[in-house]
Amino acid sequence: MSTYKVAYFVGSLSSTSVNRTLSRALVRLAPDDLELTEIPIGTLRLYTPDLDDDYPPEARALKDTLAASDAVLFVTPEYNRSIPGALKNAIDWASRPHGQNSFDHMPAAVIGASPGMIGTALAQQSLRGVLSYCNARQMTSPEAYIQFDPDVYTDSGEVTDEDTATFLREFMQEFRDHVQRVLAVLPRD
């Protein structure tokens, strides 16, 4: 059995982020053949093309992690009806310089949680547009707009509601199957 290395981003910098809690649940509920590693984004300086010839260490580490990964997962909140600036900044670093786009042909999935009823629908729509431009191979179904209920998740990522756990487990299984299908056609070197 192959193991797929999945890098994941948590779009929030908050230590108490509901999306960080959701990411812990996704790691716990993922199929055994997915190896998930978070890419930290909190120390990245703002992207500027002035550094394209000499990336700072944090940006090089981000690109190295993506290069060593088979797929990428985005777990993002919604800020002002879009994606957080820190996440967009990380994507900018990863997709540049020209000709060195880390997301090119990479299998990708998007999920997010919010206390509101629409989950993170508009942030995900915005992120999907960015990922399309970056030529990522996105899983388009199932969509997952999670209305976060703090009574359903423990800090360690356990999900106490079986319906929610089943949905998230099935989402991760679909993502795993998507990764396998994409890599069968577009293997990562």
Image: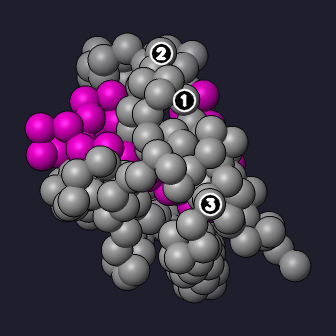
Residue highlighted by disc 2: 43
In the image, is 83 to the left or to the right of 110?
left
* Mark 1 nearby-residue class (10 Å; few <14, some 14–19, many ≥20): some
Q: Report the residue at 62% width, 39% height from top.
A: 155
Q: Does residue 103 belong to the magenta stretch?
A: no
Between residue 172 and residue 48, name the one nearer to us: 172
Coloring applied to the structure: one colour
Image coordinates of residue 80 in percent, x first then y, are 12, 38
Label 3 vs 1, first from the N-terminus:
1
Query: Mark 2 and mark 1: span between their CA atoms?
Result: 8 Å
Quarter of the N terminus within the rendering: bottom right
Of badges 3 and 1, the one in the foreground is 3
Q: Is mark 1 on a helix, strand or loop?
A: loop
Q: What element carries label 2?
A: loop
Q: Report the residue at 30% width, 22% height from top.
A: 47
Quarter of the C terminus within the rendering: bottom right
Image coordinates of residue 78 in percent, x first then y, are 24, 44
In the image, is 105 to the left or to the right of 131?
right
Image coordinates of residue 99 in percent, x first then y, are 38, 47
**Farthest residue in the left direction?**
80
Amino acid at the residue labelled 2: Thr
Q: Report the residue at 27% width, 57% height from top.
A: 119
Q: For residue 5, say whether it is visible.
A: no
In the image, is 12 to the left or to the right of 62?
left
Residues at discs 2 and 1 in contact (Cβ within 8 Å): yes
Disc on res. 160: 3
Disc on res. 40: 1
Residue 147 against residue 156 in the figure, above or below: below
Q: What element carries label 3?
A: loop
Amino acid at the residue labelled 3: Thr
Between residue 110 and residue 148, name the one nearer to us: 148
Q: Which region shows up in magenta?
A: 61-90
